[in-house]
Amino acid sequence: MKLLVTGATGKLGSLAVEALLRSVPAAELAVSVRVPEKAESLRARGVEVRYGDFDRPDSLDAAFAGVDRLLLISADGDTETRIRQHTAAVEAAKRAGVGFLAYTSAPNAPESTLFLAEVHRVTEEAIRSSGIPYSFLRNNWYLENEAGTIQAVLAGAPWLTSAGSGRTGWTPRRDYAEAAAAVLAGKGHENTVYELSGPLRTQEELAAALAGVLGREVPVQQVDDAAYAVIMKQAGLPEPVVQLVTAIQSAIRDGALDVPSGDLEKLLGRPATPLDEGLRQLVNGLKA
């Protein structure tokens, strides 16, 4: 059995590889990366390192050759680029005869109003059309995504948001990576959809949990999208990033991440990492 992870030197991919190495022999694991030199530490541990570039579909034929089960980590970039790259990867997986494809998607991808969801909606459709048995891992929100806001709070700012009472399923990236590894190395996951999320919480609840970790009050400043965008711009964020983060706040307010599910706990075999524990680790990392 040969398992392969794409994007294995990225933040999520590297954690998924580490989780897999705790459950399968290194000889059964391969990674596909654009810069093989960055994966030398994995090669030294017995993992097969293959060159694969989503912008060079011919390289993917070799990268996916002989692979039984593939974890496709969604790429970075603009929507058009990501759709092109993901489509190339799915087509290469089909040509290579991959027997199972797990893909890191977004919450409620087919119907989501989150602007990021288009990539995942199109990719899920491509995977279904390919005929390859699949599992869609619809990751909610990484707790690490809030590092910038937490950094601002550490500097004395309030918790700034325009997300209103919208709920989000924050949990550390490591939880999502371990769930992906469980699906890739496990059995009985063919043609499944998993909505992966920690307990759903509001911005106020997250700020309250952070206050408990810091041992001091963390006031919440609720503003509208226009005010949020102005403050983000004043903080020095480039205009494209301001538009991105403001759109995310709006989508959360509209319920795009409010997708109740117990799938993460089921795949992990344990509850999601407690919020205070995840926040404490994140705060310690920011302070280091």
Image (tube, helix red, strand yellow):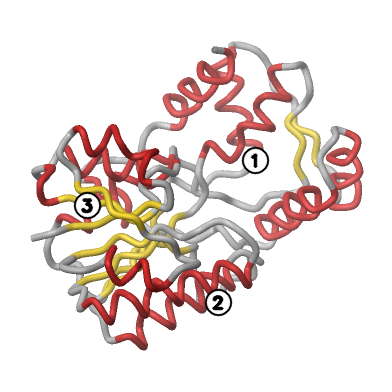
Give the image location of residue 89, x and y in percent: 39, 71
Residue 10 placement: quadrant = top left
Q: Can the viewer see residue 262 in this picture? A: no
Residue 30 - label: 3
User: Which mark's residue is nearer the viewer, 3 or 2?
Assistant: 3
Q: Residue at x 85, y 33 (%)?
A: 235
Q: Amino acid at mark 2?
A: Glu
Viewer-nearest residue: 65 or 77: 65
Residue 111 - label: 2
Q: Residue at x 42, y 47 (%)?
A: 35
Residue 203 - label: 1
Q: Amino acid at mark 1?
A: Gln
Viewer-nearest residue: 263 or 2: 2
* Residues under numbered marks 3 and 2 in contact, where contact means CB atoms less than 8 Å apart: no
Give the image location of residue 222, x and y in percent: 80, 41
Q: Secondary structure at mark 1?
A: helix
Instruction: Quadrant for the N terminus, please.
Output: bottom left
Q: Is residue 262 left or right of residue 168?
A: left
Q: Residue at x 86, y 47 (%)?
A: 229
